[in-house]
Amino acid sequence: MHPHAFAHLRAALQTHVDQGLLPGAVALVHHQGRTVLHEAVGAQRPGAGAPAMAPDTVFRIYSMTKPIASLAALMLMEEGRLLLSHPVSHYLPAFAGQRVYDEATGTTSPAAREATVHDLLRHTAGLSYAWEAGTVPDQYRTARVGSRRHSNAELVAALGPLPLVHQPGSCWEYSRATDVLGAVLEVVEGESLGTLLKRRILEPLGMHDTGFSVLPHRLTDLAEPFARDPQTGAEVALIDVSAPPAFESAGGGLVSTASDYARFLQLMLGQGTVQGPDGHTIRLASRATVGFMTADHLGGIPTAGDILPAGYGFGLGVAVRKATGLASSPGSAGTYSWSGLGGTFFLVDPAEDLFAILLTQAPGQLRTLCELYPALVYAAL
């Protein structure tokens, strides 16, 4: 990779810090078997005297949790313990007999078919995040769907009886589906999601700083955002990760570091196999399963909202680039990626033997960074 281009990458991130758009950031790029960039700019948190951002700073990664939980589901599929074609109600009875709300008539009708585990993984289960106004989103808010005080079982009890916003399988809408998947995993494994992920993925990969709360001795290393968005003035409130939560959100609850998440992406780029911390080979999934996870699972299914970028389909927990063109930033067909609400992003490009991670805590800059960072990374090829 070209060192002068990395100078541009550093300068662009530093400019965002100097302009007061980011407190700080950590960038990591791994290419052809080695980490070619792992640097920090700015400070861990706003304010005079704040410590400098460090390469091992801890971040709330929000929806970058989804690929990890999705891989855990596919590992259970490999063991014959979870079938993606099974209806969600097979594991979670609260999801039986669901109905679909019709905004035009204000009525509900029975779902044409039940949502499946496959629908959960690809966000076609008819669920929502309830970010917008409307009858069903109001019901989500009344039921406190996604409350940090709810366990996964309590989330399911609140969400299961509510109307769907689409017929299952008919539309992609970013949603609470992966949180519901977390509840499915707990039922199948008979243990909490945090325990499951730690045992099955985090510990084997040596991801010791990744979990649903920050380890006590690492609390001083947690990145924090500006209290208010520097452009809109809106209050910024990220989740409290100082103590273990009741809600272990498969859709958005983990904290991690660039080094830890790089271990997960090394596994993904290695098609389910990676060299462990002790030098031994670790295999968590087959290459066929990783290929299945990172293929487009939407085809011609329409998408709702503007979360999924132009030129992308969706796999099982990740966005999948369908062509070298069409999108607004560089990349190869087959690249897969996702981001996190707090201001985090990753991409994996198998064709270039490449992955890249950007970690910030600046929610208002997320859309810009998801376009800017790939341009800066591909400029170094």
Image: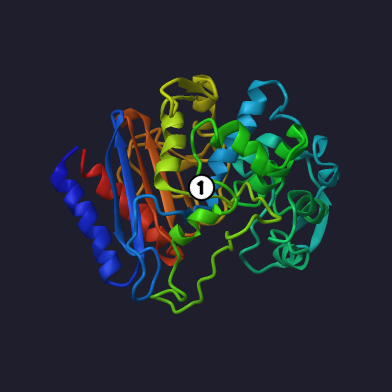
Point 24% across, 65% down: residue: 15
Which quarter of the figure is the C terminus placed in?
top left
Helix, strand or loop status at disc 1:
helix
Could you classify mark 1 by the number of other residues whose Cα lies within 10 Å: few (under 14), some (14-19), or many (20 or more)? many
Point 69% across, 51% down: residue: 127
Which percent across, then down, holds residue 344? Answer: 43, 53
Which percent across, then down, holds residue 332? Answer: 33, 35
Task: Give the quadrant of residue 30.
Answer: top left
In depth, the one of 240 and 185 nearer the eye is: 240
In depth, the one of 251 and 83 nearer the eye is: 251
Task: Give the quadrant of residue 353.
Answer: top left
Looking at the rendered structure, the kind of residue marked 1 is Met
Q: Determine which residue is flagged by label 1.
A: 64
Which quarter of the figure is the N terminus placed in?
top left
Point 69% across, 48% down: residue: 126
| Direction from residue 178 to residue 315 in the image, left or right | left
